[in-house]
Amino acid sequence: VPLHLHCLLFGVLGWVSVQHFVILSFCWVYIRKYQSRQESEVISTITAICALAIALITSALLPVDIFLVSYMKHPNGTYKEWAENNETRGQIEDTVLYAYYSLYSLLLFCVFLWIPFVYFYYEEKDDDNINKCSQVKNALKYTIGFIIVCAALLLIGAFVPLEAPPNQNGTQWEKMQYLFEELGNNHGVPALSFSISSLTLIGMLAVITYTAYGMSVLPLNLIKGTRSVVYERLENTEDIEEVEHQMENIKAKCEDGRPLSSRDRRNLQEFEDKLQVLQRRGRHLEIAESHCCTKVGSALRPLKILLGIFFILFALLFVVALFISNLDKALHSAGISSGFMVFGTNLTNPLNELLLTLQPVFPLDYVLITVITMYFVFTSMAGIRNLGIWFFWIRLYKIRPKRTRPQALLFLCMILLLIVLHTSFMIYSLAPQYVMYGSQNYLLQVTPGWVPMPPENNTTWTTKTCDADAPQDECTVTRSYLFLHKFWFFSTIYYFGNWVFIGVFLIGLLVSCCKGKKSVIEGEVEADDSDMSEDEYVH
């Protein structure tokens, strides 16, 4: 490999190392922001930080993969001198593939072993009458179920045939032998691909639920701002006086010694609970009014409006690009059995064109992919904070700064991990040509159609952009595409999921527009809060 290629690889490695440090720093700050100060645990914090960092690092590998395959060719469609050798290209492709192997294996380890074990360990810790050995034993017992699911997914992916055996009339042993040979030739890629693709289906549900709603609620909240803290304190004081008046009226009924009826006792208890919530709310509003962050937030109000406008424009660009991509698949794809694969570029997709324009100048597309991924994280977090973590109609956890329990933190980390994992599929839906081939071109031989047997000097060559219809030996497909699009039925599910995503975003946008300004202490005080969480916030 030439010296300049070594310099290029070291440059890319240096850039990736810097980004990994930034990712780890971001994850540490983000998780520490939400973890409970009184219930924080070192193991759960480390688990959440590492798992989220691995997911973000995996998504950051996509633009590197695209850059390396694009760098192999000149803009005119010919291979560069160092890349003319198939062995050299194969070494680079294998290096990227092994990186995906390592990162996706770590993600499976986090999802099916590390996070479940730590979660169940702290669930068992809530029982005061249990020792450490029993905690570990019970946590392992519940984690075994996740390991069995992981093993089943790997086995299904390994032995589900992607193509029919060549000898349909052969014996069952010959067919099994063919499956094992295919497993060896593919180096286990289908097994890992099937497992990761299955996880991204769950990530797709999280994206539809949280990200689609967060993409509408986050920018509109920034634009609308919060209610006046002075007005809220005045309104809260009036509510307290009203509740105290109602309580006095009920207590007046028993001044002559008569007992209260069951209905009056029930109403009195409800008013007492409501008064406690209002008093806590008053303390929080008093803190918010004197807090420097509230005053700084008021000074930065114009900047928040500009940021909200940028976020809503970015969301609309994202949704329009997704709509155009899905419309292109609906009109020009090879059908449902191919996973709605599109040959060639039929409709102009703005995000795809932007990424292809930025791709030759590394790391501009890298920066844009990072912006898209972090936008997904922030909007997903906005959706999770507004909706909470639910299991059907049961609310499991609330996510709030400085008051998130270790179990809720692990749940949050798992959801964000699956959302980030699904980001690669979303980017492919938005920019399929960019994800498959980057900015590669190839030379196509063209001969005049009116000459029956054209002489050799009549043959001309034209440069075409690589797409799904390009010859395999002329265009190098990214390892990401080969890894994550082995099974057509997953692509089909993602296609319909994208339509649902667009619909949920539009509904969320309508709901967010109809809502008024949120409270300056939104989500900080609720009826089911404990006294411990109240003390934790105040101090």
Image (cartoon, rainbow, N blue to C red):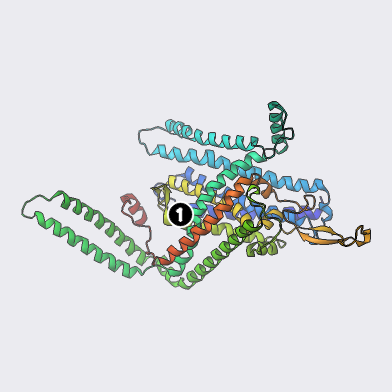
Q: Is residue 539 visible?
A: no
Q: Residue at x 45, y 53 (%)?
A: 34
Vertical position of residue 158 compared to residue 55: above or below: above
Quarter of image, res 232: bottom left
Q: Is residue 343 left or right of residue 512?
A: right
Residue named by callout 1: 384
Which residue corresponds to the image point at 31% horizontal and 53% vertical from the top-left?
Answer: 527
Packing grade of label 1 (10 A; few <14, some 14-19, many >=20) is many
**Image x and y of residue 53, in percent:** 56, 50
Locate the C terminus by quadrant.
bottom left
Indicate the position of residue 76 as horizontal and vertical percent values: 81, 61
Compared across the picture, whether 212 is left or right of 226 comes to: right
Amino acid type of disc 1? Ile
- Give percent across and percent down for residue 134: 42, 31
In front: 107, or 508?
508
Give the structural element (helix, strand or loop) at label 1: helix
Q: Nearer the viewer, residue 377 or 193?
A: 193
